[in-house]
Image (cartoon, grey):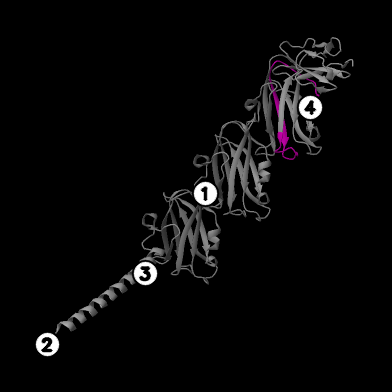
Amino acid sequence: MKLDSSRPVAGLRRLAILAIASLIGSVLVVTGASTATAATSLTETEPNSSVSRANAVPLGATVAGSSLTTTYYDDDYYAFDVPKAGRATISLTFPSGLGTGTAYYVNVLDQNGTVLYQVPVKAGDWNGAALKSLATYLPAGRFYIGVSGRDSYASWGKTYKLSMTVTATRAEAEPNRSTASANVVPLGATVAGSSLTTTYYDDDYYAFDVPKAGRATISLTFPSGLGTGTAYYVNVLDQNGTVLYQVPVKAGDWNGAALKSLATYLPAGRFYIGVSGRDSYASWGKTYKLSMTVTATRAEAEPNRSTASANVVPLGATVAGSSLTTTYYDDDYYAFDVPKAGRATISLTFPSGLGTGTAYYVNVLDQNGTVLYQVPVKAGDWNGAQLRSQAITLPAGRTYLLVSGRDSYSTWGKTYKLSMALKLTATPTPTISGTTKVGKTLTAKAGTWAPSGVALHYRWKRNGASITGAVKSTYRLTASDAGKKITVTVTGTKTGYKTVAKTSAARSVVK
């Protein structure tokens, strides 16, 4: 009988193929698991003791490392690429139970290697909460985190885990510690920042471009519950770096209302807002949000603290300003050009309800700076009537008005409105001629107003109420006028002069 050896060999081959396939499958499974682990868990690669040797870490990924090297200190650098500006949240965790001393120093550096933030991390902050709570803001670009340890720290040789995420927003870009490096912010936009840097103080500067003069409203908000002490100092500077306004902001003013209520006036141009904090303030490391808007109007332009820097205002025009500056007093000078000698009226109005004490001192000076008149204005004279009643005679030429206030006055930081106008020299009372009977035409006799060039405007009234459309020097009586009293008001206007309105005696219309 012939032996058939093909069957056993075929069976062995099938078993071998199955075994190899099973082994390959096992290898693939192991390899896949290893790849997945590598994608989510990164490990420090020494040497990484400088930004040029920094380990690249994706945002949101966690890298494990340790302070351990051949010397008594170890600086580990990690590189993160930030696609959009925003708030960075940095997490550094390590084992607990290492005491209360320093565990690490964490530095945040920009692409040039400039240290933007430096934070000492205590051993008691092992869970990372303290570091994550600090408001670290970054623009787009590459940044480095340096984790620095010493062999004298209890964390030496222990594993730490580091990660960073960034929440996109319009954010402060450090370093911005001068007007030259100020962050540019559009009017109406809000920028987020914090007082946090490598030293015990942090000055953050922001640039705003103002297209037209007006009142600036500055909003600075931050977390509540920070006590009652100073939170920040806010400075407003002009394009030359001169400080125009300086305001201490208390922690209790967290909602921004107190700062927004202050009347800060700016002309057109570039201005800077400096937000200054200290590590002794409870606001250190906390987020603040800053914005500025400007409502256009003819406004005071600081500095105007002398006749040489006086703001020029046309006669008859109104300028808005405030007693508010870097010192405890504020002298605001305004220049008016008087074409002819004559009498003038001054109007100064401001908010009511500010008590009864002194509000301002108003001085009138001639072109040489000699004081001609000085009038104290009380807070109760808010409507300007008392000052307008003063008889003031001015020579021809340039005249200055000085509005002087103090931080001890209730008007400090409040808006005032100032104007000066010459008085018309002749303002006769008009009369009415004609028969006062329905269907008849009445004529207003305005008289001669002076000086020449006064424009006259007419308004006829029935029982004291204006008659619609009756704005000419003549008026034809209608049935609605029967039995009523008719008057005419003549208003005289001239550029640079106070407007005056005069009303005639009433005429009764026959029923």
Asked if 178 appears above or below 210 in the picture, the reply is below
Instruction: Decide: few, some or many residues near mark 2? Use Cα within 10 Å; few <14, some 14-19, many ≥20.
Output: few
In terms of sequence position, does the residue under pointer 1 or pointer 3 come before the other?
3
Distance, label 1 to label 4, CA atoms, is 51 Å
Viewer-nearest of discs 2 and 4? 2
Helix, strand or loop at label 4? It is helix
Viewer-nearest of discs 1 and 4? 1
In terms of sequence position, does the residue under pointer 4 or pointer 3 come before the other?
3
Helix, strand or loop at label 1? It is loop
Residue to which mark 4 is pinned = 387
Distance, label 3 to label 2, CA atoms, is 49 Å
Distance, label 1 to label 3, CA atoms, is 37 Å
In terms of sequence position, does the residue under pointer 2 or pointer 1 come before the other?
2
In terms of sequence position, does the residue under pointer 3 or pointer 2 come before the other?
2
The type of residue carrying mark 2 is Leu
Residue to which mark 3 is pinned = 33
Kindly indicate whether the residue at mark 1 contacts the one at mark 2 (C-beta within 8 angstroms).
Answer: no
417 displayed left or right of 86: right
Instruction: Decide: few, some or many residues near mark 1? Use Cα within 10 Å; few <14, some 14-19, many ≥20.
Output: some
The type of residue carrying mark 3 is Ala
Pinpoint residue 305: horizontal percent, then vertical percent: 65, 31
61 displayed left or right of 498: left
Instruction: Decide: few, some or many residues near mark 4? Use Cα within 10 Å; few <14, some 14-19, many ≥20.
Output: many
The type of residue carrying mark 4 is Leu
Name of the residue lying farthest toward the bottom: 1
Instruction: Decide: few, some or many residues near mark 3? Use Cα within 10 Å; few <14, some 14-19, many ≥20.
Output: few
Q: Quadrant of residue 390?
A: top right
- Say whether residue 397 is magenta: yes
Viewer-nearest of discs 2 and 1? 2
**At x 85% / y 22%, what residue is drawn?**
463
Quarter of the image where the C terminus is located:
top right
